[in-house]
Image: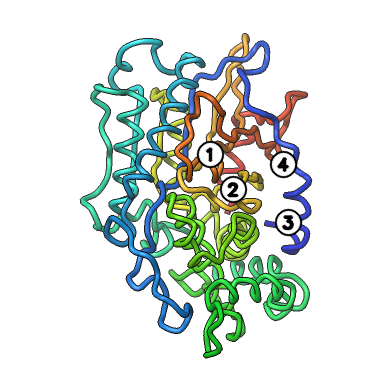
Amino acid sequence: MRGTIAGLLLATMAVSPVVVADAPPGLTVDRAVLLMRHGVRPPTKAPAMPAGVAAQGWPDWPVNPGWLTPHGADAIGRIAAWDGGRLRSLGLLPAKGCPAADTVRVIADSDQRTIATADRWIAAVAPGCRVRNEHKPQDAEDPLFNAIGAGLASYDPARVNAAVAAAVGPGGIAALDARYRPLLTRLDVILCGSAKSACGVSKQASAISPAAPGQRPKLSGALDRASTASQILLLEYAEGKAASQVGWGRAKPADITALSAFHALEFALMARPVPVASASLAGLAPLIRQGLTGPVRVTLISGHDTNVANLGGLLDIHWRVPGLAADDPAPGGAIVIERLRDTRGALYVRALYRSQTLEQMRSAASLAKDAPYAAVLPIPGCAALGKQGLCTLADFERKLSIS
C-alpha cells in the first residue's frame, strides 16, 4: 500500500466499480479462484472483550465462540447458490449434474468456521456431488494460512515497519487517534450508555508494536479495541439479533456502517501494506496461481478477513460493500480472480469482489430477487489492453509474487 491512510480512503471512495456481467466480447472465462472470508460468527472469546470495555454484558450466541452460526451458514448458502448460478452461466460448471472429477477444488483453514463455511458452499454450489473439502484437523495449525508465523515467507521486518509507518502517515499513530476521536467518542457512548465509570475504548492511546522476525506488527490501544468492538457490533447486526441486542439497543444501522471504518483501518495499517501482504500470502499465493494455471476450473479458499485484506493490499484493489466501510472484508465476502481467454489463446485476469450487503445478511433476503454486491475491481499496474479491469496473466503473476 502506498501513501497515507487519508490518501487510501480518498482513492477508495473514488473507485467506480463495474457491475459484474458476462465476460467482455471475444473473451471466455475458463478459470475462477475465490478467496472468501468465513460467514457470520460470534466473538472469538468469551467474554467478548476485557472487563470494563462495556458497561453491560455482551449478548449470548447460539454456538461456541468463533464458530459459524446457523444464520451465518444460511447466508453462506445463499451467496454460494448465487456463485453456482454464475459459474454455470460462465460454463465453468455444467448446467446440470455434478462437475467432473478434479474440476472443483476447495481448501479451508482449520477453524470450525472456515471448514463449515466451505462445507456449506460445496452443498449449495454442487448439491449432492462429491467435492472434497481439503483442510487439516479442526484447530490444528495450518501454515498455509499463517505463512509468517510458520516461516514460509521471506520477511524483512525493517521493510515491513517502513511500509506500516508510510501507511500511518504524517503525525504517526497519535494523529490517527485525533482524526478518529469523534468516532471513538460515539463508540464509547454505545459501549457505556449512561455509565459514568471508566468504560469504553478511547482512553488508552493507540500504539503499534513493530514487526520482528517471524512476527507481524500489532496494533494496540484505542484503535485496536475499536476495531474489535465495531466488528462485534457488525456481527450482532449481521446475525439478525433483535435491535435491543445490537449494541444494547444503542447502535443504529448508520452506526454499524460508520464504525466499520475501525476494522478497515486496522487492515489498512496491519494487513494491506505490500511487504506484510506478500509475506502473509506466501502459503496461499501458490494456490491462487495453481487455480489460474492448472487443470482445476474452480478453486475456493475458505479463510479469514485478514487473508482477503492481504490480497486486496497486494493487488491494490478496493471495494465497498453496502453497509460496511470501504475495504472492510464482509462475512462471506470474496475476492474472485478470473482467468479469461481470447480467440487467439491469449490469457488475461480480472479481479472482482462479491458479497451480500449487510442488510441481506441480516434479513436473510433472497438473492434471486435482489442481487448481491458484485463489482469488477481494476488492478493498478497491469497492462489493461483497452479492456477495463483486465490484466495479462503474466502481469498478474508478477503482481502476485511481489515481495
Q: For residue 192, which numbered disc appears in the image?
A: none
SS for tag 2?
A: helix
Q: Residue at x 55, y 52 (%)?
A: 309
> Are dots 4 and 2 in contact, CB under 8 Å?
no
Residue placed under numbered mark 2 in the picture: 312
- The residue most toward the left is 137
- Give the residue type that dot 1 points to: Ser
Q: CA distance from mark 1 to mark 2?
A: 15 Å
Residue placed under numbered mark 3 in the picture: 8
Q: CA distance from mark 4 to mark 2?
A: 11 Å
Q: Residues within 10 Å of mark 3 (few under 14, many from 20)?
A: some
Q: Is residue 174 above or below residue 63?
A: below
**Lower sequence index among marks 4 and 3:** 3
Q: CA distance from mark 3 to mark 1?
A: 21 Å
> Are dots 4 and 3 in contact, CB under 8 Å?
no
Quadrant of the rendered image containing residue 296: top left
Frontmost of labels 1 and 4 is 1
- Give the residue type that dot 3 points to: Leu
- Give the residue type that dot 4 points to: Pro
> Are dots 3 and 1 in contact, CB under 8 Å?
no
Q: Position of residue 180 (x, y in %)?
A: 70, 72
- Give the residue type that dot 2 points to: Gly
